[in-house]
Amino acid sequence: MQKIQVIGLREQLEKAMTFLQERNVMEVKELSADITSRINSATKHDHDLELKLANLDFAIKLLSNYEKNSILPSPIILNATNMESIAKTFNYEEAIKQAQRLEEEMVGTKNRLTEIQQDEKALEPWKNLSVHLDTPHVTRTSKLTLGVIGKLDYEKFQKSLSDLGLNIDFHTVSEDQSKAYFSLIYLLADADQISGLMSEYRVQEAELKTAEGSVKQHLHAIKKESTELTHQLNKTEKELAELAKNLDSLKVVHDYYLWQFVREERKNLTGETEYTFVLTGWAKKGALKALKGDIKERAEGVAIVEVAPEEGEEAPVALRNKGFMKMFESVTRIYGLPLPTEIDPTPLLAAFFIIFFGLCLSDSGYGFILFSLTFIALKFLKIPEESKGLIRLLMWGGLVTFVAGIIFGGWFGLTPEQAPSFLTKMVPGANGEEVLGFKGQLINPVGSGAIIFLGLAFALGIIQVLVGLMIDGYWKIKDGAIMDAMLDSFLWIIFLVSLLSLGATGMIESLTPYAGLSKNIALGLTIALVLTQGRKSKSIVGKLGLGVLSLYNVVGYFSDVLSYSRLMALGLGTGIIAFAMNTIAGIMVDLVPYVGFIIGIIVIILGHSLNIALSTLGAFIHSSRLQFVEFFGKFMEGGGKDFEPFTRECKYTHLKD
């Protein structure tokens, strides 16, 4: 990365900004204090654009609820020319107005519908009320009360009311499971006695809205209005569904104006005087030469100059991998970017990750399905470029899984006896007799084969840990820290190899004669580590103390290697679950008459689909974890800031070059 400044005449600012946005190779930064103190403040946001984007966002979100969704929706992929043409010809303002009008109608209709439904709910218990809703509740001599009481107290209340011996008109209007609804007309002179009794039995007075006619008539009017409102709501939703046919165009228009809004935002980072402007940021070194030449053709009098970074300023990081390696960037980015002073780990993890992924799945049938699905997706679906990398990675992972499955004899969890004949052949058994086995199978994970699988996992772990230390040493040499590389990286590599050799002489009979030599080499290297690992301490005691403590790192390295046992665990787990699904399906076929076969097929399809999904997820996660913890930790700190070029940003569409 190279820090640059773009300087030119103010009248060329728009052309220069448009050019830089199209080229997508410069990250624009805020001007430093010493520059901003000598220039005028930058231009403000274009509030019209901001409002326009907000209105477009509103319309898109509203209409998205009424879009006819396909099973596999295709993203909108267009080039800049087509997007500009749509933005300039499509009457988006009218579409927004219609969306706003229909949304207002829909909200109003829904609110009114909710209101009358609440009225209906409140009136339903009173539909048999004999008096009209506009009848006065209080006259000069009497009062009408509509009461609600708990059903358990209702009979007692009626008896107590009767015992008062008052001149009343009492009617039960309705009852439900828990409450009773009644009307009561009594003389005002008896109001105190009635009120006291109602309080005693916790009677609630109902207050119904005043309206003409009876409750039944009002309920009928409500039902009629509810039908009309529902019809109106359906009509509005149909209009919204029709308007939603313009959703793609609205999305294109939104992103077209988003480009302009982003450009206006970047202008706020530009310093301007009466006649000139200055823009600062970072650009890719490889694109700088062409950028300098091309900008002069697009914006006359504009120049790009290279400047030194400020003290402590850190350059952004852009990963530069092409071809096969590009797809592995999705793994690196999950962990985080390297610092500008660190190596890009993407090419270094590629082989390890893809092999680990295949071993974690280790089923040829699953690998074939994963490869086929991802291949079809890449071939026939419009997938955004930024998502293709991960899908390609899964496709290649499926291919490696297919090969690993052949080696381990994994075919949908089938035994050789269950598998089709073209997958099997007669092979020598453990006792010398011929047994049925899978073609191409080199390791049988059942029985002693599991130990071989575990040994393979450990061997791969040892290789990756040592490679990590080698990379650390190489990078230190490149930075000029040759002594640190020799003593902190390569000395540890030799020491760890010596320990492995010492272990091998104790386990392999043919290597036993070399046990003494291996022991002496390991002892000598141990002394070398004790004498060198504390070299940065000022005191002799500190040097020796740190040197002795450094030997504890051996535990860490071997702990790292043990982590690779997960490859075997996941690989065996995939096959065991697949076998279990086949067994359950077989049991269903045998136990359930007539439909057992159909149930078995369903179990096979659902069970294996779930196993493929979960096992693929597990393979990706654990293969990634081995890179992040056991590998990256040897040579990389991480924490780099991603390079964010000034570009034509898109929210709903994907820009095609």
Image (tube, grey):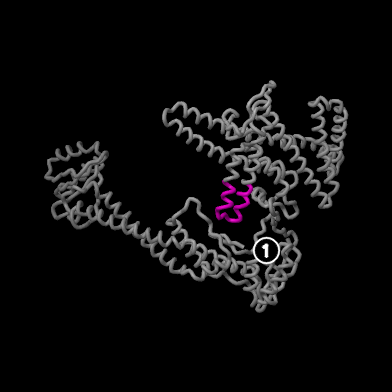
Report if residue 379 lies within the magenta region: yes
616 left or right of 121 in image: right
**Residue 58 location, x and y as percent?**
46, 61
603 left or right of 278 in image: left
Q: Residue at (69%, 58%) from the top-left corner? A: 316
Stretch of the chain drawn in magenta: 373-393
Q: In this view, does 17 lie above or below 477?
A: below
Mark 1 packing: few (<14 Cα in 10 Å), some, or many (20+)? many
Q: Name the residue under label 1.
A: 25
Q: Residue at (45%, 26%) from the top-left corner? A: 591
**Which quarter of the figure has residue 322?**
bottom right
**Which quarter of the figure has residue 359?**
top right
From the viewer's side, name the closer residue of 210 and 495: 495
* Quarter of the rendering occupied by the C terminus: bottom right
**Residue 439 location, x and y as percent?**
65, 33
**Residue 622 location, x and y as percent?**
64, 40
Q: Residue at (81%, 46%) from the top-left corner? A: 473
Q: Residue at (67%, 43%) from the top-left corner? A: 354
**Residue 545 location, x and y as percent?**
82, 37
From the viewer's side, name the closer residue of 655 and 415: 415
Q: Is residue 23 above or below residue 145?
A: below
Report if residue 292 lies within the magenta region: no
* Quarter of the rendering occupied by the N terminus: bottom right
Three-letter residue code for mark 1: Val
Residue 309 visible to the viewer: yes
288 left or right of 539 in image: left
From the viewer's side, name the closer residue of 626 and 460: 460
- Magenta-drawn stretch, dominant element (helix, strand or loop): helix
Of all residues, the one furthest to the bottom in this rendering is 275
Residue 137 visible to the viewer: no
